[in-house]
Amino acid sequence: MTAGRRHLAPLIAVLALAQVLAFGAHAALASTPEHAAPAPPNSTAAPAPQAQRQPAPAKIAPTSSPAGPIALSNERTATTWAHPVEEVGIRARPLVSSRTIARTHLATEDGFPDTYLLLSSLTDAHGRVWVRMRIPGRPNGRVGWVTRDALGEFHVTHWMIVISLGGRRLRAYNKGRLRFTAPVGVGKPSTPTPTGHFWIRELFRITDRSNLYYPYAIGTSAYSTLTDWPGGGVVGIHGDLGQPRLVPGAPSHGCVRMHAADISWLAQRVQLGTPVHIVR
């Protein structure tokens, strides 16, 4: 070996050792799966034996699960109501395939925008919002479902009316507090005032003193036994028909009569959608 080569020998040995160490480190990394080097271009990597034995998982389309019902009214201190914006079928259940038990109406028998008392809402698996509501008309006491888009803006009233047939008395509450009480005339035994959970569908003032219903008439969702009565037998709360001495009493065909001063007080405060509970 020449003198020049003797001087270079240590450097060559160091470089050789570095190559060995570098190759060993690269081999160690390549043997670790999470650090595996990508395959060279135009090459096909062989799948691992486990991947060959197990098929790829099936793709599942995302779906939304139905949300639980949300209460809209307790029919005591807070009650939600709305006018319908279209005439649609009212379903027995919150399903488009469910049977139709009634239809919404845009107007009452007197031509006023109809009013529906809303009980609760829920969202189905398809994201469709349903509203459970009370249905006016015979038979009294039905409930059903419509989709949210069939109804207009939601409103809330804090009033509640309770009419006691036996006590011949009306009581009005606001936010659960008794605010007013008055004697009433109710249906006679042959044409009784129906009991149940109802609400105010329409409310209008009568300025003509010669009108028997003066000074206010409140249309409810209750229907009397008189199917041939003008307007279909809607049970109303109105004036005393010029017979104040019959209040309190049981003189009517199913409607509720009040003295003029009493119904004036009531009608100027309660709102559409106000629940009317008629009890024995």
Image (cartoon, rainbow, N blue to C red):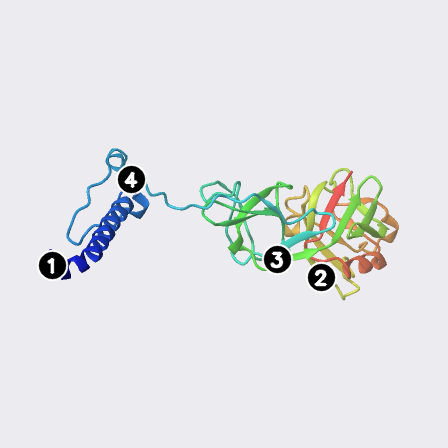
Q: Which residue is mark 4?
A: 56
Calculate the distance from the C-alpha at mark 2 to the C-alpha at mark 4: 69 Å
Q: Earlier in the sequence, mark 2 or mark 3?
A: 3
Residue 73 visible, this angle: yes
Q: Say what amino acid the circle numbered 2 marks.
A: Phe
Instruction: Point out the image quarter for the C terminus.
Output: top right
The label number, if any, that marks residue 204 in the structure image: 2
Relative horizontal placement of residue 181, taking residue 274 as reference (left or right) = right
Calculate the distance from the C-alpha at mark 2 to the C-alpha at mark 3: 21 Å
Q: Earlier in the sequence, mark 3 or mark 4?
A: 4
Q: Residue at x 74, y 45 (%)?
A: 277
Calculate the distance from the C-alpha at mark 1 to the C-alpha at mark 2: 124 Å
Q: Which residue is mark 1?
A: 2
Tag 2's secondary structure? strand
Calculate the distance from the C-alpha at mark 1 to the C-alpha at mark 3: 103 Å
Residue 22 vertical placement versus 46 (above, below):
below
Q: Earlier in the sequence, mark 2 or mark 4?
A: 4
Q: Say what amino acid the circle numbered 3 marks.
A: Phe
Relative horizontal placement of residue 98, taking residue 55 as reference (left or right) = right
Q: Earlier in the sequence, mark 1 or mark 4?
A: 1
Q: Say what amino acid the circle numbered 4 marks.
A: Ala
